[in-house]
Amino acid sequence: MNRPATQPGFAALAAMTGAAPYRVLLVDDDPLQRALATEILEPPHYQVDAVAGGIDAMACLETHTYDVILLDQHMPDVSGDDVCRHVRQALGDAMLPIIVVTGSSSADQLERSFAAGATDFIRKPYQATELVARIESAVSRKRLTDQLDSAEEVMFALARMVEARDGETGDHCTRLAELAVRFGRALGLAPEQLLALRRGGVLHDIGKLGIPDRVLLKRGPLDDAEWTIMRTHPLIGDRLCASLRSLHLTAPIVRSHHERWDGSGYPDGLVGEQIPLLARVFQLCDIFDALTNARAYKPGMPTAAALEIMQGECDRGWRDPALMRTFRELVASQPAVHPPAVEHDDLGRTLFTAVVASGARIREDDG
């Protein structure tokens, strides 16, 4: 493979300007087109890796990260559409912008490229201003998405610390996420719903960040006033998740997983199908995991005994009867495999102590 022709001196120039350069993978078998694009996308604003074919591009993608791919549609070794599919399927990168460069005016060909994973196109010959505008737009959207991903990572880290603070064994969230996805698949839910269930496994109790230690960690039953405080945690969690648009399907799980089919749950007293479907799916998994796994104050119980307790709750009108039937069938046909426990380190607990005061303020702001 020919090594990518990286723009010289971009690191020093970018450091001088204080701005991170846009990382561009340029893929074109025509040396004149590569030279033209490289001349337009000059440092310090751009770092360009230029390669002559799809195979070299795939190799670069294995070892480098990019903000955008500028991709010729027709190449002798691997087509541009094949590179698109490699990015979306083999690498699993759904967000990397891919701008197809084409000399064709065929709408059918463009449709095939978009189906393969392209996000935009530009026709040859193009003007420098047009190329720059397309890349600027694509990279701006990607970097915004990257920032949202970073915010999600903070949210998940906080949720893990909540799990540690609450005295869980450390793999509760992981078990719960896996079981919820298995149940969702059995129900034929869409991929985005399965992702929401997986995220819900980690984030469902993030609102406990705003619950005082004297309530959350109390040994023994809570009094009425303490229960009122405890029952605010779904509202706090919902507000935290609502701040990220990427969690719009997960937020209803966080808010409503303590609702009951007959309307006796909290925080909103929803009845029947007023309770979001994903929350109804998730709560069965949450209850089952709580019953079958040991906690500091109780041993885990056998699957059959847990299912009988859950069926009793269903008969009392607390659970969705149709979902309960499917859940019993799932557990009977696919015994769960528990992942190994994850130990929480002292640093995580220390970080939690630092953020819990701000979480309590969130609860107080709720009134």
Image (cartoon, rainbow, N blue to C red):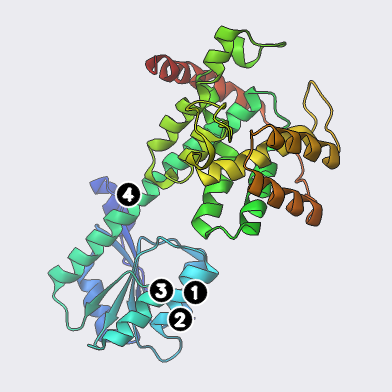
| The C terminus - image quarter | top left
The Cα atoms of the two marked residues, 1 and 4, are separated by 23 Å
Up/down of 336 relative to 52, above or below: above
Up/down of 44 relative to 75, above or below: above
Task: Estimate the x, y position of residue 241 in percent, counting from the top left.
Answer: 44, 36
Provide the secondary structure element on which disc 4 rests.
Answer: helix
Residue 212 seen from this side: no
Task: Estimate the x, y position of residue 60 in percent, counting from the top left.
Answer: 47, 70
Q: Are marks 1 and 3 in contact (CB under 8 Å)?
A: no
Name the residue tied to disc 2.
82
Identify residue type, mark 1: His
Q: Which mark is residue 4?
A: 3
Q: Quadrant of residue 31?
A: bottom left
Residue beneath the point at 30% across and 81% down: 110
Q: Are marks 1 and 2 in contact (CB under 8 Å)?
A: yes
Name the residue tied to disc 4.
144
Identify residue type, mark 2: Asp
The residue nearer to you, when weighing 196 against 95, is 196
